[in-house]
Each structure stands twice: as C-alpha cells, then as structure tokens.
Image: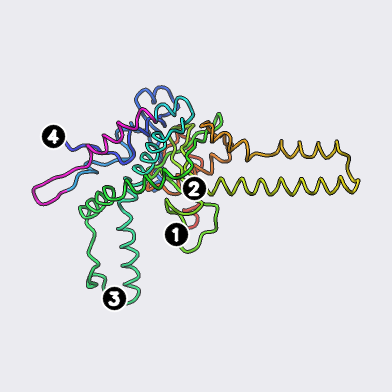
Amino acid sequence: MAPQHQPYVPRLLLKGFLSRDPAKASKEQVHVFDLETGNSFTPPIDKIMGETRFNDFWLDDETLATIEPAASRIESRLAPLVENIRATKRLERSREEREDLALLMAFQFIRTKKIRLLPESLDRQIRVQVEEMGFDPGRIKGLPLLSEEILKREHVRHQVQNLDTYAKIIAEKELFLMMAPDGCTFYIGDNPVVMHTDEERKGSRGHLGLGAPYIQIYLPLSADVMLCAYDKAVLGQLMRSNDAEARQIQMEALGMLTRGEITPSQMKRTLNDMAALDVTTPLIKTIRAGEAVAVAAEQVQCYNSLQAFHAHRFVIDPDGKFEVAAEMVAERKAAAD
C-alpha cells in the first residue's frame, strides 16, 4: 500500500478556510503562505499541513505502528459539531458540547509538527550552551541525539498520556465564539491552537501554558468563526473593572448632585451615557447566550498575527492577501540584516 499523507491539521479544520475564489474552492484549494521563503501557493487541502506517514512509527525493526486510525476516529466524532458551529455561529453551551470542543482544542494543540519538534529545539539549545561552556555535547551522559523515530515515538507517547488531561483543563474554561466582520478573514496556521495573556510575563516563556492564570486560547474554525477558551478569571477581571469604573462614575455624579453642580436630570443623563458605553455587560450576555462575539477588523489582524507568530512554517488566508504574515516576514528579515 502506498504511504499515506497524514495531516497534523486535519481536513475537518482546513475545509473552513477554502479559497474565496469559487473555482479554487470547488477543488478544495487553499491559499498558503510559506513563512520561511515568503512565497505563496494554492494546494488542495490533502497536500498541506501533513506529511507522509506522520503518525506512523517503528516499534522495532519489523513492526510498524500508527495512531492514524485513532486520529481519524476523533475527527469523525467532532466533524458534525464543527460543521454545525460554522453554519449557526453559536454554541449550545451544553456539557457534552463543552467537553467535545475541549477535546478538539486539546487534540489539535498536541498533534502538530511544532509540538513534535519541541524536544529537538530544546536539545539544540542545550548543546549550544554546553559547547559555549567548552564541553563536547557528544560526551555528555544523558544527552543522546534525537532521531526522527525517537521524536515520533516521544510525540505519540505524549499524545496518549496527556490528551485527556489537556482536554479536562480546557473544559474548565469559558468557551465562546468570535466572529470576524464582513471583508475580514481569520488565518489558520499549521500550529493553530495559540495562546495569549494580557498579564505581565516573567522569564523567557512567561505564563503561556494551557492552565496558566488569565490564559486566552484561540482556535480558528473557519474564515469567519473562531473558538476561544478563556480562563474564567479573565471575564471576572473584566466585570470587576467595569463595576469599579461604574461605581466611581456614580459616586462622582452623586457628589456633584449634592453640591448643586448638576441637576437630577443631568445626573440621570450621565448614568444613561455610562450605561450606553458599557461594553462588558453586553459581552458577557452574548457569551452566556452562546452567540458569537463580533470583533473589529483590527482585532482580526491581532489574532492573525498570533497564528503567524506561532506557526511552524505555513499559514492559510482564504483571501490570499497575507498582509499580516508578509509584514511579519519582512520585519524578521529586516531584524536579521
């Protein structure tokens, strides 16, 4: 049997990012940008974000094993849910849905090539440091060379041992949708589960783990819909800040009223203006109703920059414009010169 192309970003997701050109979409083609070369091309989704026998590995010299059937079963289970969300732009907010979406995020987070190559990247950094100290890395006990097969086996072990744990962590978060405005599209990268925090980061990696406080996790599901998982403290922080600001305005208005600086009607107008400017309360209501939160074009650009920044090599833009990705490549090139 011919070797299979096995994806680490599956058709289940890539189908949501087909080219906006109807002729290309009919052939299931996508606009892809190569962050290494700065070139773009338009392959079918069966030829991108995967590799031949990516999920196959040798147990010994004679036994070839694979997790591809297990991956396919998970994708088949989740496909109807993803397709329904794309069509309705809303969540049911049931326990079963939350657990399935958490599984989707966890599995996509753990299965990519970038995750597979993390040990190799860390190993390379350690070897550089050892060499800078004047030692030979090849003579350091416990520092073996990481072959492709070793990386594969370790990646499979990591998936099997940690998928359920990661899914449970994500299921504890506030899950909701964001929707892009007309004329804007979300990117999807080859490492599409990306994380962000507005809290101050300490150290080289900061606090960007799935279970980190105030973490925000994003997974685009289509050109116009993105799944979000926020640590519940993020929304709580927004509400507390909003409430504190409202109380301050109310106290100031009451003080001005008692001093005779404004009339009761002016105070009422001030409080009404305050309510009209309140974006947090409607946001929370939208999320709790299962509806998608509408975001502005500037926010879409920010989320696309996260996809490009965290990608291993490739990003997809249904419009084929790649403005954010091209700008990032140009900045990196300028910094290197």
Other residues around mark 3 within 10 Å, as few (<14) / some (14–19) / many (≥20): few
Q: What segment carries the magenta color?
A: 58-81
Query: What residue is shown at x 33% (from left), y 61% (from top)?
Result: 122
Judged from this view, the residue extending furthest toward the left is 62
Residue type at tag 3? Phe
Question: Where residue 148 sits: x, y (%)?
Answer: 22, 53
Of the 4 image quadrants, the one containing the N terminus is top left
Q: Is residue 190 magenta?
A: no
Name the N-terminal-most of marks 3 and 1. 3
* Residue 220 located left or right of residue 79: right
Location of residue 68 in the rendering, given as x and y in whole percent from the top left corner: 23, 39
Helix, strand or loop at label 2? It is loop
Q: Position of residue 303 (x, y in %)?
A: 51, 43
Q: CA distance from mark 2 to mark 3?
A: 44 Å
Q: Residue at x 56, y 41 (%)?
A: 299
Q: Which residue is mark 1?
A: 205
**If you read the primary sequence from the N terminus, does the residue marked by circle 2 or circle 4 appear first?**
4
Label at residue 1: 4
Q: Residues within 10 Å of mark 1 (few under 14, many from 20)?
A: few
- The CA distance from mark 2 to mark 1 is 18 Å
Q: Amino acid at mark 2?
A: Asp
Q: Which residue is mark 3?
A: 135
Q: Nearer the viewer, mark 3 or mark 1?
A: 1
